[in-house]
Amino acid sequence: MPKYYDELDAVLRALADPTRRAVVERLAMSPAVVTELAAPFPMALPSFMQHLSVLENAGVITSEKHGRVRTVSLRPGALDILHLWLGEQRTPAEHQADRLGIHLARAAAAPTPKDT
Amino acid sequence: MPKYYDELDAVLRALADPTRRAVVERLAMSPAVVTELAAPFPMALPSFMQHLSVLENAGVITSEKHGRVRTVSLRPGALDILHLWLGEQRTPAEHQADRLGIHLARAAAAPTPKDT
C-alpha cells in the first residue's frame, strides 16, 4: 500500500467528524489561538485538544506555541491530497462534461466572427 | 446539525478505507458486476459485500439486480458533497491564487493587441 494511501486514510478519518470539520472551516478563514478556537464547542478543553491532535497527526493543521499561547493554522495544501484523489474519480461522463465546459468557455472567450 | 453534515460524515467514513476507495476507483471507469468487482481483493465475499454495503448506505454507489447478477455503479454526483465542502475550505491565500489563475487564463484566451 503506497504512503499516499495512508495519508489519505488519515485525512479522511480526521474529516469524518463534525467538530473537526468545524475547526477546519474556522481555520480556513485565519489562524486562531486554541482558547478562541475552542470557545464555540460545548466540550471540555481536553476533549477538544484530542480533536486538534487527530487533525495535527493527519497533517491537516499545524500549531505553534509562543509563551503560553498556542496558535493553530490550517496547513497550506493540507487538503490537496483529497482534491487530487477526488479529481481522479471523475467518471467518463463527467470528463465529457468537463471537456464541453472547457470548449464553451473557450468559445465564449474567443472573438466572434463579427468582432474580427 | 444539518442533514448535509450527516451525509458528509457518511461519505468521509466510507472513503476512509483503502478497499472501499479502490472500489470507487474501479467504478469511476465503468459499472461492474459484484463477482468481477470482488475478484482483485484478497478477502471472503461476505467481507467484500460488507464494504459495498457501507458505500451504498453512504450513497456513494448504487446496485441493481438482474436475475442472479448484481451490477454496481458509482452514483452520479456521489462525491459532489465532498467537492463542495472542500471548495469552501479554501484559505484567503488560495482564493487569491485562484483569482490570479482566472486572470491569467483570461489574458491568455483574449486576443493580444497585435491580433486586432
Image (cartoon, coloured by chain):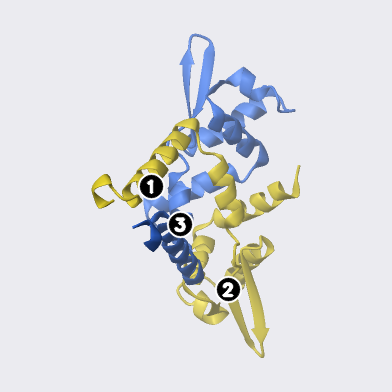
Chain colours: A blue, B yellow
Residue A46 percent coordinates (x, y)? 65, 25
Q: How crowded is mark 1: few (under 14 residues within 10 Å), some or many (20 or more)?
A: some
**Residue at the spot x=76%, y=42% of the render?**
B1
**Residue at the spot x=58%, y=73% of the render?**
B73
Tally of marks: 3
Disc 1 sits on a residue from what chain? Answer: B
Q: Mark 1 points at which residue?
A: B106
Q: Is mark 2 on a helix, strand or loop?
A: strand
Q: Nearer the viewer, residue B116 or B44?
A: B116
Whether marks 1 and 3 lie on the same chain: no
Q: Nearer the viewer, residue A113 or B9?
A: A113
Is residue B42 visible to us here? no
Q: What element carries label 1?
A: helix
Image quadrant containing the N terminus of chain A: bottom left
Q: Name the residue under label 2.
A: B73
Residue type of the residue flagged with mark 3: Gly
**Residue at the spot x=51%, y=44% of the render?**
A11
Marks 1 & 3, CB-CB < 8 Å contact:
no
Q: Could you say which quadrant of the image residue A106 lies in?
A: bottom left
How many angstroms separate mark 1 from mark 2 (CA)?
37 Å
How many angstroms separate mark 1 from mark 3 (CA)?
23 Å
Residue B42 percent coordinates (x, y)? 47, 70
Disc 2 sits on a residue from what chain? Answer: B
Marks 1 & 2, CB-CB < 8 Å contact:
no
Whether marks 1 and 2 lie on the same chain: yes
Disc 3 sits on a residue from what chain? Answer: A
Q: Mark 3 points at which residue?
A: A87
Residue B99 percent coordinates (x, y)? 44, 39
